[in-house]
Amino acid sequence: MKDCLFCKIIAGEIPSKKVYEDEDTYAFYDINPQAPVHVLVVSKKHTPDVAHNGEMNDHELAACLRTCAKVADQLGVAKDGFRIVNNCGDNACQSVKHLHFHVLGGEKLSERMA
Ligand code: AMP
Ligand code: ZN
């Protein structure tokens, strides 16, 4: 989608530090990490968020979670545990309106989730 930051990253128009890629998803390091490991998993198909994803099928949606798990394994945080975060909409402070999941790990995370 024109003027979407993550679509531009997927297309290689804006640089990113790639961690993993398959036909449905792209994963790269967050530019402003909030944990020792902080990776963004984005769907290759543009859709705004989990509440508005009519253009995506179940396989494409599930692929995002599978990629989160693969990234956690690849970066060595799966054993000790990690967190997957999805911000949806303004109250959740979603800043990029392209479906994405944060994979956070590498240390004991806060017990608070909000
Ligand atoms: P959210 O606030 O859930 O929409 O998450 C958006 C995330 O994108 C934030 O954690 C930002 O740090 C991250 N971000 C913004 N621009 C870039 C970029 N160019 N490369 C990597 N991560 C980015
Ligand atoms: Zn997009």
Image (cartoon, helix red, strand yellow):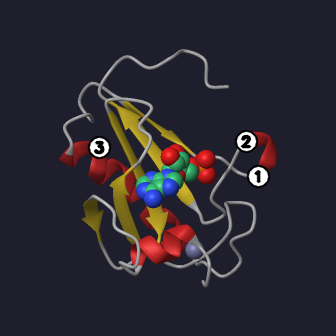
Query: Which class describes the residues within 10 Å of circle 1: few (<14), some (14-19), or many (20+)?
Result: some
Q: Which amino acid does label 3 sit on?
A: Ala
Label 1 vs 3, first from the N-terminus:
3
Q: In which quarter of the image is residue 57?
A: bottom right
Where is 109 relative to 32, above or below? above
Residue 101 lies left or right of residue 53; in this view the side is: left
Q: How far apart are marks 1 and 3 (CA)?
A: 25 Å
Label ID, residue 9: none
* Residue identified by numbered label 2: 92
How many marks the image carries: the answer is 3
* Residue identified by numbered label 1: 89
Q: For the N terminus, give its image quadrant.
A: bottom right
* Residue identified by numbered label 3: 72
Q: Distance between the residues labelled 3 and 2?
A: 23 Å
Q: In which quarter of the image is residue 3?
A: bottom right
Query: Which class describes the residues within 10 Å of circle 2: few (<14), some (14-19), or many (20+)?
Result: few
Q: What residue type is labelled 2?
A: Ala
Residue 9, position in %: x, y? 42, 71
Label 1 or label 3, whichever lies nearer to me, is: 1
Label 3 vs 2, first from the N-terminus:
3
